[in-house]
Image: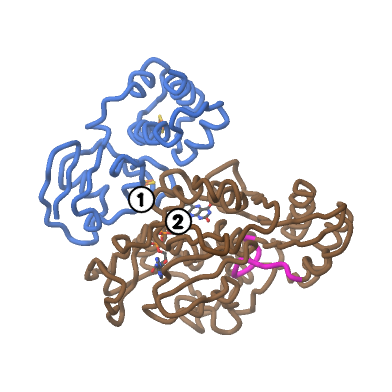
Chain colours: A brown, B blue
């Protein structure tokens, strides 16, 4: 691991020095530092900042502090009761130990698990723009079918972020407020840029609007537990009289960001809440998929997941 | 920095790159917590940090000034007896992590009933290369039922 200077942030108005990187639970950053993929000069520990509260918002929503541990959020009574999709997504991620360390903001900003990205000795356009993307021809079984580019097909690995995307979460930073969907940027020709955050911009909380329907998360992985998704679906659904009144859908492990399925949602609103409309809606979204040699299975997987999750909620 | 380990205060002067796992093993002579993968993938390094189970291989020790850590060496809990009774191990490499994790997990469950599938899910962050899982589950089941 490269050497670095360590500091602890004790108040929100302390400026961040150039070159500094925030450290939260460390479950991703410390790992990447050991691998030589992350090489910060200065680490600023943000876990002592007062960002570890979950509180009710006046509009009936919820404010989740950036430093709340994933395990605490998963069992928070309001999350369990009003946002089950979020609780389920959190509990489907990582392990009990890791969730005790991982934080809200760290989870959102965790980096891809693409094996070429995680190996500092491999070419990767995220490490070194212009060095190439070996995944295009190589191991891309768990990489993107939506939103990728010839420069990068890395997938965003978070479960929590998929649930938050379906919940229309808003990210608060020390400078502004951002819809979660606007936090991440697609790779295009600059995959080294993953979010719109500027250097030293601190996420302070994630806000949820009031609950808008029944919700659920379902994740498929290579083993029963303690594995990243190969595909997942988060859904919020409200059905009136057998008709879809409102629906929000997000897909995980299929794109460089949690993928909000707007086309599927549009195809569903006002339609009968039946398996055949659910499958048609999934098809409307997945028509844009551009699978590679070894990841076309994700199309079928997501299609079936959409139908089963929505049937479970309808 | 100051760290309380198994009830004993320690004053340490560490390279900031040192993980809690390396601090325990290399600087304090506490080799109970094991280094399996060093990347959060196996659970062999599990210890209790302020009572909560964590992977000590992914925590920088410098972040823990003033914290309290319990390792297998400092633990005295019915889960240990139960692992012996039920033969919850073969080579024993994963055992300190399994036991610390089980103690943390039982505190998280807070008396909730734990069917085997639930024990397995909650313990999924601890791998056992010897495949002693059925006996590990049996040991935890017994303590959980008390
Ligand atoms: C073996 C293993 C299995 C895993 N399995 C899963 C899984 O199945 N599903 C899943 O979703 N995740 C999984 N994870 C990933 C885990 O959820 C993330 O590592 C964790 O959520 C990151 O949170 P953290 O607080 O530890 O972040 P850190 O590692 O501390 O930080 C991550 C990034 O966020 C930045 N950051 C942190 N806080 C802030 C802030 N307030 N403002 C701005 N930037 C900030 C840091 O600078 C860094 O770039 C797994 C991890 C491991 C090691
Ligand atoms: S050594 Fe820490 S999880 Fe494997
Ligand atoms: S007893 Fe050998 S690894 Fe678990």
**Magenta span of residues:** A252-262
Residue tagged by mark 2? A54
- The correct choice, above or below, for B35 with respect to A118 in the image is above
Residue at image x 23%, y 32%? B73
Where does the image place residue A60, in percent across and percent down from the top left? 57, 60
The picture quadrant where one finds residue B81 is top left
Number of numbered markers: 2
Where does the image place residue A200, in percent across and percent down from the top left? 36, 78
Q: What element carries label 1?
A: loop
Q: Which chain hosts label 1?
A: B
Q: Distance between the residues labelled 1 and 2?
A: 32 Å
The residue at label 1 has a CB less than 8 Å from ligand 2: yes
The answer to whether the residues at label 1 and label 2 have Cβ atoms under 8 Å apart is: no
Where does the image place residue A162, in percent across and percent down from the top left? 60, 61
Q: Which is nearer the eye, A172 or B96?
A: A172
Residue tagged by mark 1? B38
The residue at label 2 has a CB less than 8 Å from ligand 1: no
Direction top: furthest residue: B85
Q: Is mark 2 on a helix, strand or loop?
A: strand
Where does the image place residue A112, in percent across and percent down from the top left? 52, 65
Q: In which quarter of the image is ligand 1?
A: bottom left
């Amino acid at each position: 691991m490269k050497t670095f200077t360590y500091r602890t942030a004790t108040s929100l108005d302390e400026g961040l020095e150039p070159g500094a990187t925030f450290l939260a639970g460390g479950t991703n950053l410390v790992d990447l530092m050991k691998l030589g993929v992350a090489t910060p000069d200065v680490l600023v520990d943000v876990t002592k900042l007062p960002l570890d509260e979950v509180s009710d918002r006046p509009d009936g929503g919820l404010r989740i502090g950036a430093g709340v541990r994933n395990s605490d959020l998963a069992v928070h009574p309001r999350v369990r009761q009003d946002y089950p999709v979020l609780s389920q997504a959190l509990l489907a991620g990582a392990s009990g130990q890791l969730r005790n360390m991982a934080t809200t903001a760290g989870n959102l900003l965790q980096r891809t698990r693409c094996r070429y990205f995680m190996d500092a000795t491999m070419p990767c356009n995220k490490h070194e723009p212009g060095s190439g993307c070996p995944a295009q021809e190589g191991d891309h079984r768990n990489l993107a079918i939506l939103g990728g580019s010839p420069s990068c097909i890395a997938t965003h690995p978070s479960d929590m972020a998929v649930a938050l995307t379906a919940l229309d979460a808003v990210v608060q930073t020390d400078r502004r407020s951002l819809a979660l969907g606007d936090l991440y940027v697609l790779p295009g020709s600059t995959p080294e840029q993953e979010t719109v955050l500027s250097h030293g911009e601190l996420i302070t909380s994630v806000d949820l609007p009031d609950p808008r329907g029944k919700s659920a998360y379902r994740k498929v992985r290579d083993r029963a537990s303690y594995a990243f998704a190969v595909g997942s679906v988060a859904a919020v659904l409200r059905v009136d009289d057998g008709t879809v009144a409102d629906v929000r859908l997000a897909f995980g492990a299929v794109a460089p960001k949690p993928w909000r399925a707007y086309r599927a949602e549009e195809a569903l609103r006002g339609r009968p809440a039946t398996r055949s409309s659910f499958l048609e809606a999934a098809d409307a979204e997945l028509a844009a998929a551009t699978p590679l040699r070894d990841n076309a299975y994700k199309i079928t997987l997501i299609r079936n997941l959409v139908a089963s999750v929505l049937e479970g909620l309808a | 920095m100051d760290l309380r380990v198994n009830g004993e205060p320690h004053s340490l002067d560490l390279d900031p790159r040192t993980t809690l796992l390396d601090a325990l093993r290399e600087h304090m002579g506490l080799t109970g917590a094991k280094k399996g993968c060093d990347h959060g993938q196996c659970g062999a390094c599990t210890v209790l940090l302020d009572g909560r189970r964590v992977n000590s291989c992914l925590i920088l020790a410098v972040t823990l000034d003033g914290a309290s850590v319990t390792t297998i060496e400092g633990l005295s809990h019915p889960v240990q007896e139960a692992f012996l009774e039920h033969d919850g191990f073969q080579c024993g490499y994963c055992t300190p992590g399994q036991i610390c994790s089980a103690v943390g997990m039982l505190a998280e469950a807070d008396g909730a009933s734990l069917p085997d599938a639930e024990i397995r899910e909650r313990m999924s962050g601890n791998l056992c290369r010897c495949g002693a899982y059925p006996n590990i589950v049996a040991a935890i089941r017994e303590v959980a039922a008390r």
